[in-house]
Image: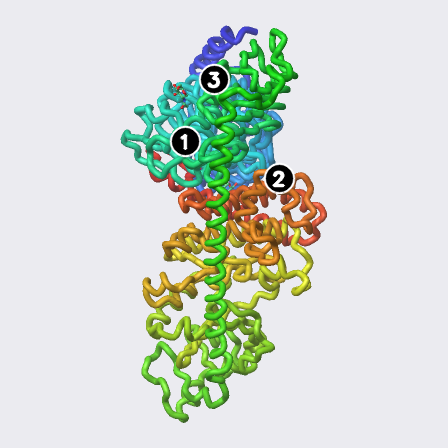
Amino acid sequence: MGREGFVPLFLLVAVASLAAPAAAAGDKSSDAAAIGDLAKSLTNPPPSWLGGGDICDRSDGITCDGSGRVTGINLARKGLSGTLHTSLSSLTALRSLQLQDNTLSGPVPSLAGMGSLTTLALDGNAFTSLPEDFLQGLISLTELSMDDLPLKPWNISDAIVNCDMLQSFSASNASITGAFPAVLANLTSLTTLRLSYNYLTGGLPAGLAGLSALETLQLNNQKSDAKLSGPIDVLASVKSLRVLWIQSNAFTGPIPDFSNSQLETFNVRDNMLTGVVPASLMGIMSLQNVMLSNNHFQGPKPNFTGTLKTQDIDSGNGFCLKDPGPCDPLVTILLEVASGFGYPYELAQTWVGNNPCDGSNQWLYLSCINKEVISINLANKNLSGKISPAFANLTQLQKLNLSNNHLTGVIPDALTTLPNLSVLDVSNNGLTGPVPRFMSSVKVTATGNQFGESGGGSGGGGGTNGGSSPSNPGGSQNSKSNAGMIIGILLAVILVIICVGLFLHHLRKKNIDKFSPVSTKSPCGESEMMKIQVVGTNGNINGSGSAVPTELYSHVSVDSTNIADIFESQGMQLPINVLLKATNNFDEGCILGRGGFGVVFKGNLNGKLVAVKRCDSGAMGTKGLQEFMAEIDVLRKVRHRHLVALLGYCTHGNERLLVYEFMSGGTLREHLCDLQHSGYTPLTWTQRMTIALDVARGIEYLHGLAQETFIHRDLKPSNILLDQDLRAKVSDFGLVKLAKDTDKSMMTRVAGTFGYLAPEYATTGKVTTKVDVYAYGVILMEMITGRKVLDDSLPEDETNLVTIFRRNMLNKEKFRKFVDPTLDLNAEAWNSLLEVADLARHCTAREPYQRPDMCHCVNRLSSLVDQWKPTNVDNDDEGETSAMGLNQQLEKWRCNDFTISDSDSFNTFNVSRKYH
Ligand SMILES: *[C@@H]1O[C@H](CO)[C@@H](O)[C@H](O)[C@H]1NC(C)=O
Ligand SMILES: *[C@@H]1O[C@H](CO)[C@@H](O)[C@H](O)[C@H]1NC(C)=O
């Protein structure tokens, strides 16, 4: 049957049914029966539904037409519970059914007979499943909202094509699974489509281009492992689009040309998009809110000159400069080259910033001399697209390998103008057209393509580097500059070694000076107790007589009170005799470790194990008591599951003691590189990932979520403590702040540990949260390789893990050997390791602005941890893992919520739920 004929026919029927009641199925009395059934199945129906008489007269939430048929039920937000009776579907005249925001449960009954229904609102209930025939027969439906339902996972069935009047379809957080439903492309009346927070996967179907009325599209935050992915080009064809939310997915490729659209809100943050942000986007006059952060955008930072209300583009991208403005010409050329291939993700990860040839941040697959690219090797990179003529602008290029990809199009003629080109390999692609004529000095390999004429074959000329004039002078020039460079590097290395030597020597000396007095100077015997003061009540009791202690401590009976009570009654202050007792007078045998700020003892406070940090008086001594107290006051408020909690403290003369929760699993350092000594078994990759995520969350909290921003400044594996389940907590945060007297001393005192110091911190003393991100990156590298950041036992050019890690990442084979040999990695784990390695590389970028924020690390890692959780579900016996997974899920939600509430604040259109 032709649909053109069908629709008017249906309209006729609908109009007729308004006037003449006794239409096909159902009548006034069956409606009354259905309402009666419904009243019974609800646990608390509107009171008037229970009385007798005409249902249309009672009308609590019921609307009727002139003939007494029920046309509307509105029970939104009535606090209803219970279920929906199956006779609901006999209300055949019903046009609007609004049940949103109650706690209705059980299955949604069949609605198949309700051909008049135009509005159906089920959202915000506790329905558990949908009927088999869901959406069948709902031919008049224009508005369907069903967000926030704890449904069994379901797919949008093809039956939805019959709802071709549907204008608004909102089903966020409704357990929809499967590939993005291509059938939606048939709903050409759609103006609003919301499918956020579901489990959709796969790419956007090309048919979406046909949704010519679509104004709001929200597909953000898919909860499936794979999320929505692929390019977003099709969206540029939806010309009516005003609001686009696709954040927190896995979309790839560049931003297409949206210049024909009416975009007001463009939220693509937290994806894997690449390339240069097109000028066409900046030219959209209607644009008000733009969110681009945490992708892999490259090239010049976009400059939205208009009147944007919200702009979130800075973090986590690879723009060449901090401010808008043209990039270095070499960057422009290379990105033009990448554009030919569609800005592949693999390139976008390292082709960032403004210095393609910059030592440790050098873009992958390039070789440079004197800041000029001399060779590019992109063989086997799964590239598609075209060979850009921009290659010809790399005038020093000698070797170009593009073999074994899927490139199409022609070899640009311009390549023949490269004066120094000696090797060109384009074999095994899908190239067509004539092969340009290269100079005889160029060895061309072009087999395995679809050239019309007999292609270049192997070699336009026999000699690889013939005596032709262009190549020789270049060669000698290069070797000259090579020599210069080598000498330069040697000098730099020697200088660095001297500096490191002096620095280490200085540290060692300092440490010796530091620690001896702690253990010998003022032994804490019984008599010492006499001088104890309870700090905070009043500061002037110092050195009072021997009669004082009984009074002071009379209310603390160490043996009978539990530790919580002690802390409670003393406001976290502990008398020193309690700590002396707990640590057996600071017995050497109780020492857990020594660090930059003192010695840590294991203590037993009434059966509860604690760690007591006895601060080095040199580090703390000059700090005023009040100031120390003020800092302690802040520190005790910093509470987080992944931070070691400060339980209490004690001051006594120059003594400063901090009491922490005891972590029975030792330090991460012991688990990573001191295995023979510590006797631990090597951590698995899953364990390392979990630890890395724990640490990231702890630091994220310190950086932004605590009452004030804390910068740890001394992150390292020995400051990461594990519990018996190998869950990690960060310790020693806030100590630098506790220890410092003034900013000046801060500069002279090198807080932090060599190897983990961000370059800008080491050289200028400038402290930002990115200092911790750097150290975190180093820790990730140690977790991947099982090596210490500085290893004197290795040859000189291999002592620094960061340098050699970054270098080895350039070569997959080398890198594989470099990974901790105790790790047993399947393919999936290996992929996740590569992701973490990439994160580590970014975290250790030289410029602070190139490093991601901690929140980004949390996001990256949590998606990886979640991603391969399922492989463990089956053979993991403890239920704890799944509980942990849930926690991580929840936390991920929370993290995402930031994103959302950010974007919420600008939202001018009407949404009922925060993430729509
Ligand atoms: C998703 O829906 C469930 C109820 O099904 C609700 O408890 C939860 O809060 C919703 N999630 C969000 C982010 O609103
Ligand atoms: C490459 O060189 C050509 C000719 O000199 C110039 O027109 C073009 O802008 C250059 N392209 C880039 C990306 O620098």
Earlier-in-chain disc, 3 versus 2:
3
Residue 850's quadrant in the figure?
top left
> What's the CA distance linking mark 1 and mark 2?
27 Å
Task: Classify mark 3 as within 8 Å of ligand 2 or not, answering yes or no.
Answer: no
Q: Is residue 710 above or below residue 900?
A: below
Residue under label 1, please give it.
299
Quarter of the picture holding the N terminus: top right
Residue under label 3, please give it.
417
For the question of whether residue 377 can be seen, the reply is yes
> What's the CA distance linking mark 3 and mark 2?
40 Å
Q: Is residue 358 above or below residue 528?
A: above
SS for tag 3?
helix
SS for tag 1?
strand
User: In front here: 274 or 264?
Assistant: 274
User: In front here: 141 or 38?
Assistant: 141
User: What x and y, as percent, mark residue 578?
Assistant: 50, 81
